[in-house]
Every structure is written in C-alpha cells, then in structure tokens.
Amino acid sequence: MRIDDYETLVAIQKKCFGEMEPWGKDQIESQLAQFPEGQLVVECDGRLVASSSCLLLDYDDDLEWHDWKKTADSGYIRNHKPDGDTLYGIEIMVDPDFRGMRLSRRLYDARKDLCRSRNVEQMIVGGRIPGYHKFADKLKASEYVDRVVNKSIFDPVLTPQISNGFSLQGLLSNYLPTDTESCGYATFLEWRNLDYAPASKRRHRRTVRPVRIGAVQYQMRSIGDFDEFASQIRYFVDVAGDYKCDFLLFPELFSTQLLSIIPALRPGEAARRLADFTPQILEIFSDMAVKFDTNIIAGSHFVVEEERLFNVAFLFHRDGKIDKQYKLHITPSERTWWGVEGGPSMEVFDTDCGKIAIQVCYDCEFPELGRLAAARGADIIFVPFNTDTQSGFQRVRTCAAARCVENDVYVAIAGCTGNLPFVENADIHYAQSAIFTPCDVTFARDGIGAEANANIETVIIHDVDLELLKRHRQRGSVTNWKDRRTDLYEVTSLRQESEPAKS
C-alpha cells in the first residue's frame, strides 16, 4: 500500500461498508509509518481492487480483543510491536466488482506468509458477519454463527475465513456498533502458524513444502456448441479452486472434442480448423487461473504458426503469466494424419511452487527429456496425454513412473476417456490418470501417490512434499540422480546450449 492509494481505498470502503466511517488519511499515513509491510493491496491491470491492514502485538489474555479501537489504536496502530508474536488483522476489503476472484484468500495467504517469514506464532482477526441482519429476527447471533460454520448458511465474510483455515474462538458483541449488517457482532477467529519456532530453539527451517496437484480425467463426448465445452472446463477449474490446488493438469488435445461441432473435413484441414478455437480457449484459461487462484497446465492444443501445425501445451500461472511447451516428439499417427511438426526446445518453468516441466504424451517416452528437466531444477513433471488403447496408455504410464525413479521427481499424468462417434482419429480414448512418486520407504509403497479408476470422468487430488523430495535425493535408500556416472555419460541439449529458450 502507498499513500497515493488513499482516495481509492476510501472509495472501496464506501462500496463495501456502506454508512460506516471510512479511514482518515492520517490513519493510513500512520499505518504505513508503523508497519508498511503489513498494509497490502491487490491491483488488477493497474487498478486497486482489494486491501488488507494489520499490525503485530504480543499476545495477552487480558488484551481487549473485543474492542478493535483499543487493540488497533483506533486504526493508527501506534501500538505495533515489530517483534510481536501475534498478527492482528484490522480489515480486509474487496471491491464488489471484483468479488468471486478469491482475492480475500490471496490477502489471507499473504498475511500467513508474513507470519511465516517473521516467525509469528498466530493470526487473530475480529470478523464481521454481514449476513446476520437477514436472520436476526429468528436466530441468535451464536446460532447464526454455528450454522455458518456447519455450512447450512453462507456468510460473505465468515465462510471464506473458515475456508482459509481460521478457527472460531468466540463471538464478540458490540464490536462495531455502526455495523448494522452484523448487528454490531463480530467473530473472534484464530489461525496458528505451524512453522512457528519459539525463540529458545535454534531450528527455523521448514520441514514440509506441500504442493497440491489436481489431474483431470476428462470425458470426451459430443457437444452442441463451444459454450458447452467452456462450461465443462469451468467446472473442473472451480473444483480445483475449491480444493485449493496449486496445479491443475488437463489432458493432451482434449479440445478435439470441438471436432464434433464442425463439419467433417480432411484430417489436416480439421486440425487447422481446430486451431482457430485455441485463442478462445486460452482466454478462458487465462481468466480462470487468476480467478480460481490455480496454476493450470491446460492440456495441449493445436496451434498454427507460419503455416506450420504444432501441438502446444500451455501453462497459465495464477498471477496472469502464460508459458508454453511445444510437443517435441511427434507420433507417426500425428505426423501422417494431421501433419503436426515437432517443436523447437524443452523448457523448465519457474512457478510460485518451484520449477516444473511439461512433457506432452509421447515426449515422456524419451528419458533424455526427464534428465534435462531434472538437471535444470524441475521437481515436478506434468504429462498431458491422449491415448486410444490400453497398450498406448501403458507406454505413457510406465515411462512416467520410470522418470520418477531415474530423476527423483514427481510426475503427474492426465488423459481423456470416453468416445467421439464419427470423429476420425479421435473417436476412442483410454486413460487412468495418476500422480507418481519415487519408489522408496518415505513415499507411497507402490510409487503411486494417487490414481483414478480407469475410463471414468473424475479429478484426482494429491499433496506432494518438495522437502521430502530434497531429502530423498541426498539420503534415500537409493539415490539414482546423485549416483549417475557423469564420468562415463551425459545428456545435453544442443539447441538450448547454443540458443537459450525464451518462453
């Protein structure tokens, strides 16, 4: 936050909180002077659309948490303690025009990161319950809160707070008398920092680095129009957002489903006609990655560049950035049926959860790519695939599991199931999506973190631990990556050594 944001902050407050008195400029100036890193905003295309204010305190049972003016010095936070053990949240607000994009979750996550980076034990907030006025004539405030917690009632503030890991500690009356929507009530909520290390201990290193992966086993079916296709995509991304997935993987060329709504053409023409839909598909995924706060590997899609047809996987970062990985190895069927060409280089992408690589279906069957990806720091390899028979699927599955053993990485695969009657070369599909791990005692016994049932539409979700992966590389029962005989052999990328890839 900057003082230049003041006028916009006031405008948002008036939209969010109606008749409540907005911040004074002197209060914002004081907040920025006392604890600038605790005052956060979200911008969208240069426009300020959400904000968060907080301070640090030393926890005291006798502190008057029920009185926000005393706890937050009436908004001036001159009582802020730089070495405090408790983060106290004063306010979070989101412009109503930008609700539904999980911006409050991002702000809560930023507060949590602040707690972790400063080794703060806990976060406490006094939360409004703005939906209560609709039920005040028939429910006590305590009954209303109980129903919100058990999800029989939705409250626009308390429901997201519970979803963000806060536990309800109590109900405060007369917290903010001017808050008529909450009838003056507020909840007393707490979030505990599990990474907190007391000052008497020397060890501050995080021992767990969880990353949540979702993989979509997508059912191919005839559709009536593009909107029906788009609604299926939105459904799966919404699921990933609800489960707070860090990554969501879609299958290779699942957009061939759109062939069911275009006239029958020669295969090469059909593929290029399909490529005409790719910009629309990219726009949908770009919007949803930001809205649902999930990095999306959006399968792969046909792209025409300078009259050449490529099969390209796209990575949509949840901060709006877009990367792409061309399929490098083209199957005989793709080459002769559609005229697809292989792409120029293999990429490794920096994400907010570490480095990842993407290998499109057949690419996974070439072990050199796994070696190159691991050498450049990739911890997770995503494999969108599209196979028609069980034997084709087994090639992808077996090679994906092998990449985990060879390179001490995680590999997620996602494929299509179902049928597209009368769509040539994309009429039948076989898939059993999975998330694989190295094979060692610290991982899943069979090297399978999660696995879908074959040939049903579903989403699998699994947490992988990057810190566990790091320890395995150094002290596993076997250390394949560490024990390579680089004095005898090596794997290099000639193109990338001479021409660094640009994404």
Image (spheres, rainbow, N blue to C red):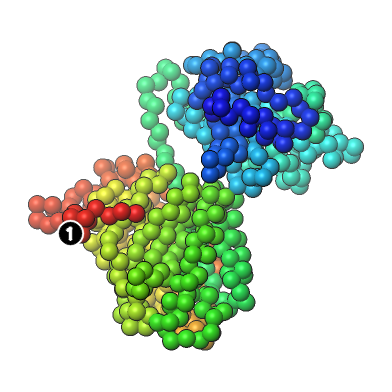
Nearer the observer, 178 or 1: 1
Crowdedness near tag 1: few (<14), some (14–19) or many (≥20) residues, C-alpha within 10 Å:
few
Task: Residue 406: tell me if it is visible.
Answer: no
Judge from the rendering whether residue 460 lies leftward or rightward of residue 382; answer left or right: right
**Quadrant of the rendered image containing residue 176:** top right
Front residue of 417 and 496:
496
User: Residue at 35% across / 51% down in the picture?
Assistant: 349
Please determine whether, in this image, residue 308 is positioned above or below residue 22: below
Taking the image as shown, residue 89 lies to the left or right of residue 290, namely right
Residue 464 in view here = yes
State the residue at coordinates (42%, 71%): 302
Asked which secondary structure carries label 1, the reply is: helix
Q: Relative to the observer, which residue lies in front, 282 or 487?
A: 282
Q: Which residue has dot 1 on it?
A: 494
Of residues 395 and 236, the one nearer the viewer is 236
Residue 217 horizontal/vertical position (percent)? 50, 66
Looking at the rendering, in which quadrant would you find the N terminus?
top right
Residue 108 placement: quadrant = top right
Q: Position of residue 214 (x, y in %)?
A: 49, 56
Image position, residue 79 (x, y; %): 59, 12
Look at label 1 and name its amino acid.
Answer: Leu
Horizontally, residue 64 falls left or right of residue 451, namely: right
- Residue 138 in the image: above or below residue 60: below
Residue at image location 40% in from the left, 36% down from the top: 207
Residue 439 x, y percent position in the rendering = 33, 55
Question: Which residue sits at x=53%, y=49%?
Answer: 290
